[in-house]
Image (cartoon, rainbow, N blue to C red):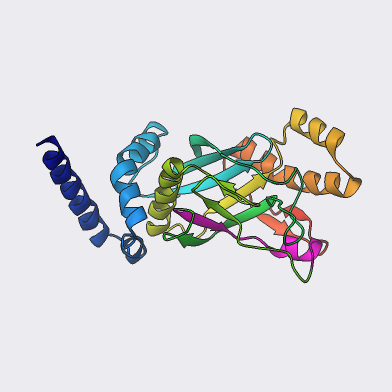
Amino acid sequence: MQLHITRIIFAFSLLFICLSFSNSHSFKSEQAKYPHVRTAYIEKWNIVKAKLTKAGIDTSKFEIFIRVFKREESMEIWARSKHAGTFSLVDTYDICRASGRLGPKRKEGDMQVPEGFYHVSVFQPNSEFYLALQVSYPNKADLIKGDKASPGGDIMIHGNCVTIGCMPMTDDKIKEIYIMAVEAHSKGQQTIPIHIFPTKLDDKGMTFLKNSAPDKTTIDFWNSLKSGYDYFEMKKLIPNIGIDANGDYTLEK
């Protein structure tokens, strides 16, 4: 009897989710065709809504920002109501497995997680790693500074807790992150920024990096990340990042 009731509740939940998709943007409707996305909404949307509401976010229309710290093995999700003021921290997620070392990715097969300023380039609702958001690596800076013939690619935020150069979550947590991204994109956020840092670039973090850097080139690279990090820390707004002819990041006015 209990099993029968559970199945009925699940069926009604699935119907509710499907109806909500049908009244949404076509992107969200396309995502709903995939079982892992539907499951994520059934299991996690109420939890995600509660987290957003607690952060003061209008869940009917919002934007998100993803920030990663490699040394801390953590991923922050920030959000704001659409075009309304500053970003607020929604939650911090543990990266469940790491590869490589501190420092940028420069070539295919180096097992490095990139460092720099990126965005979500592809949603993968049928990923072999449960759900995945592809990172826009390599960007212009990576192509200038990295291996010209084979800089690598296919860097993801994904589930299944395995990695070679990616940022894996447990399946449980990728469900939350993925549907937040789907909601933001379906409500008009065309570019979801992803900033990846070696560590928190405050004074303590910069001292650590300078004492552990393998060479001056790496220190100079980390210094080029700091202006973007500081801008967000001070203003809680996404910095406008440029890339100069040398492949260094610059803070645009």
Image quadrant containing the N terminus: top left
Residue 21 position within the rendered picture, expressed as x and y whole percent measured from the top left = 27, 58
Instruction: Identify the residue at image location x=84%, y=47%.
Output: 218
Q: Residue at x 40, y 54 (%)?
A: 182
The reply to whether the magenta stretch includes residue 138 is yes
Q: Please tell me which residue lies in front, 246 or 68.
A: 68
Judge left or right: residue 181 versus residue 17.
Answer: right
Q: Can residue 243 be seen here?
A: yes
Give the total number of marks visible in the rendering. 0
Residue 84 is at least partly visible in this image:
no
Left or right of 114? Residue 247 is: right
Whether residue 162 is situated above or below residue 146 in the rendered picture: above
Q: Is residue 118 above or below residue 177?
A: below
Is 167 part of what is drawn in magenta? no
Between residues 2 and 16, which one lies in front from this camera angle? 2
Q: Which residues are magenta?
A: 130-147
* Residue under the image location 66 percent in, 53 percent down: 117
Q: Quadrant of residue 226?
A: top right
The residue nearer to you, when weighing 233 against 41, is 41
Between residue 30 and residue 150, name the one nearer to us: 150
Q: Position of residue 47 (x, y in %)?
A: 34, 37
